Image (cartoon, helix red, strand yellow):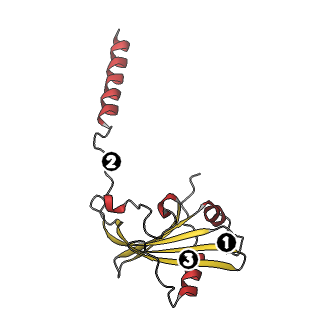
Amino acid sequence: MKQINIKLIVWGIIGVVAMSCTSKAPVELKEPLVFYPFGDVPENPQSLQVLTSCLYPKDQSMLVIYGNSIAFHFSKSPEHPSYPVGTVLYGVLWESEADEDWFGAVVPKQIKQIERVEVVQEEVIRYDCYDAQGKQQKRPINEAERIQYMLGQQKARSPEVK
């Protein structure tokens, strides 16, 4: 009888702890961060995989590089010298802000600029640049430099769990 009471108490405590650990708070998305296809941008970069990100504290901005599945799988294998045909990369430059919930964290606030690089053929690379409203911009003077920068970014590596 004592053993049954102890089991009942233990299971009761486990049940109370499990129920108290569930969150009742709804998940809130910050509306300005939701990227809707707009303007001249042909697709939603946020529907692609994140390859890497860079912080620019002086400008209070951050660059997130998204890639299609070809770019994502290619970036896993560093033995290839260049991205294959069909690769599409997006560089989305965000104005950044401190995260209210996590001390020291930086999160995107709103889009400043979008760059798109596509490997059309072996030696043919298409570059497009869009403003914060998704309107296509004139080709920048440093277009070749921007293409090299985008294609030179490596996928961020996360630690492997063994």
Residue 9 lies, in percent from the top left, at: 31, 21
Relative to 20, is 69 on the left or the right? Answer: right
Disc 2: which residue: 27
CA gap between label 2 and label 1 equals: 37 Å
Residue 61 lies, in percent from the top left, at: 37, 75
Residue at image point 51% right, 85% down: 139
Q: Residue furthest top?
A: 1
Disc 1: which residue: 83
N-term mark: 2 or 3: 2
Q: Secondary structure at mark 3?
A: helix
N-term mark: 2 or 1: 2
Circle 3 Cα neighbour tier, 10 Å, few/some/many (<14 / 14–19 / ≥20) = some
The amino acid beneath tag 3 is Met
Disc 3: which residue: 150
Front-most of residues 56 and 150: 150
Quadrant where the N terminus sits is top left
CA gap between label 2 and label 3 equals: 33 Å
Kindly indicate the quadrant of the structure image that contains residue 2. Answer: top left
Mark seen at residue 34: none
N-term mark: 3 or 1: 1
Kindly indicate the quadrant of the structure image that contains residue 95. Answer: bottom left
Relative to 83, is 110 on the left or the right? Answer: left
